[in-house]
Amino acid sequence: MASLHDQMAATGKVKRNNDLPKGVERLKEEHRKVVKDCRSQIEHWKKVENDYESLQDRLRTLPDKLSYDITVPFGPLAFMPGKLVHTNELTVLLGDNWFAKCSAKQADALVEHRKKHVKNTLDDLQKVMKNFQNRADFTDDIEKLTGDTGDFVDIREEVINEEEVAKGKHRLAHKPHSNPKQEYLLELEEDEEKKEGDEERTTGVLSEEELWARLDELEREEELQDERYRLDSTDTNGEDTTSSSEEEKEADGGSSVQVNGHQNENGWVPSSITSQMNGTNGSHPEDEEEEDCDEEAGNGLPTIYFSHTAEFKKVRINTGKNTTLKFSERNEQKAQAKRKKKSGKSNGHSPHECYKITSPADIYRVFVDLVNGEPIPRKSILKSRSRENSVCSDTSESSTADFEERRAVFGRSWSHDDATHSDTSDGITEEESPTGMSPRTNGRFEAFTGTVIEKDPLPCSIPHLTIAAPALPTIPERKLEEVGPEAPQEPPKRMSKFKATRLHQK
Amino acid sequence: MAEVIQKKLQSELEKYQQLQKDVSKSMSARQKLEAQLTENNIVKEELTLLDIQNTVYKLIGPVLVKQDLDEAKATVSKRLEYINGEIQRYETLLKEMERKSEQHREVLSSLQQEYQRAQGQAVGKA
């Protein structure tokens, strides 16, 4: 008996050491056994089915003759010639010691009925076999995963709870049923009841995490929806917001914590943060980039230099209450708009493709106004005066007062001799664009068909608005907008194009 | 002390094994009943396929006894009900036995632990 116990102890220890691979082996064995059983059973039933088939054949041919001459087995060793009579009368075993006398055709029907049962059994067995086969394969995969030589690597990141999840201020949930305070409560509970069942605790924490994850998901979805809706409804509004958002984004390098506390954009924002940091820390990389761009394009085109000012924080705060939402939305919108432009341009812009487009900046270089045969870079590819002459631009119906102001300042600070805004705004009738493009762009973008009335341009409190080629025009515009009247900034974004036109026509 | 535990462990083990055997027996009986159930179902269905003209026989021992079709149908239905009842009975029985065997398993494991501890102590003493 001692030996038995020793064995048990020994096996216990051994099991602990090699638990996983042995377990997996055992599991695989069981699976294989089941699969083998299934296979043998399937074979058996298939044979039964074949037997029934041949029986049916026999039944069909049997009543053809009144009697057959047969060799009758006589005991285990002998045969005797005999006759098979009453060929249509059959005694059928129904099962469970029940017999029935019936004709060949009736017997045929019975056999058919039995075959149905056999088929059902076969199908079930097949299903079971497939199921277990899958399970076996799955365990194989798992083994590979956890094994040393697996191709897959489990990447884990230890999360130091609240710090990493939300950078900066933790967002309040917008959903009614999610209660941020719950989390803290839960933590307290954890601390207090540490000795409580692990399961309870873990399930509690999981549910919280699940809730947060679900929250984030929903928020993301909501934002995307909003963004899409906005883009669809008013294109230029989107444009404005995107342009402003980009400026915001670039301006945000300093503080940025709050804005980037947006959990949803976590993966995306960090990249933007880095770009912002790069931008703000010295605007050097950007400046260099600009300069490079200038160098490249500087042959005939005027260059636009742009640098960040210290107005950043103000800019950010002024953008509105829902900073985070807007921020991300605008960013995405801007990205989308850029993408649109890029795609739009690339679609039909082959003649202009002498410039190789490698960065968003390049896009602007290609957007040129042909004034008197000379290519003049457009101040903004977001706005266009007339539909026909626009090159791949979304017209800004909500080109509101602010916009005019922006453009005004823009024009002034532009190093290029492009005189007054009125000139630029009205005069830049884009005869340039290849006609082939315009119909296409017309179809894609909404056109602004009203007249543009210039308002008094804001005093250029921002000393240096050197704007570099492409994306940049929008940014200083945005900044101006921020620095300027804040009030009109909010409504214009949301103004419908009709209202905007009305305003202009006033 | 260790020996006492050992004896206890042994008896418990035997009881547990006995219980396991009972469980397996009930299991096989239940499986048989299930086979009969399916068979009787088929018979019932096939009887419905026949008409009154066919004579139905029941095999009792070496004799085929003529039966009425309706009678046969009734008999088969009754048998089906009986089989179902038996299956239910066996189900409950199995559950009961399973529970008991679970208890025995726990007792066994606790006894085993005690025994190991006792052995450890004995080794320590010695």
Image (cartoon, rainbow, N blue to C red):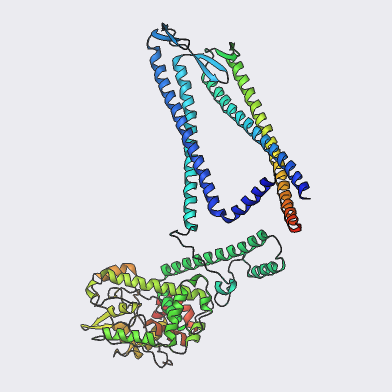
Where is residue A324? Give x, y as percent: 51, 75
Where is residue A51? Give x, y as percent: 43, 24
Asked whether residue A66 appears in the rendered view, the answer is no
Which residue sits at x=65%, y=68%? Answer: A182
**Relative to residue B86, is residue A489 depicted above or below?**
below
Residue B95 shown left or right of residue A434 in the figure: right
Considering depth in this image, is A253 or A159 the residue closer to the camera? A159
Considering depth in this image, is A21 or A233 the residue closer to the camera? A21
Quadrant where the N terminus of chain A is found in the figure: top right
Which residue sits at x=38%, y=81%? Answer: A474
Residue A269 shown left or right of residue A296 in the figure: right
Residue B126 shown left or right of residue A363 in the figure: right
Residue A143 shown left or right of residue A417 in the figure: right
Asked whether residue B126 appears in the rendered view, the answer is yes
Q: In which quarter of the view is residue B69 placed?
A: top right
Which residue sits at x=49%, y=82%? Answer: A316
**Relative to residue A296, is residue A33 depicted above or below?**
above
Where is residue A21? Give x, y as percent: 53, 53
Considering depth in this image, is A294 or A315 the residue closer to the camera? A294
Quadrant where the C terminus of chain A is found in the figure: bottom left
Q: In which quarter of the view is residue A396 placed?
A: bottom left
Which residue sits at x=53%, y=22%? Answer: B46
**Relative to residue A82, is residue A412 depicted above or below?**
below
**Relative to residue A390, is residue B65 depicted above or below?**
above
Q: How many marks?
A: 0
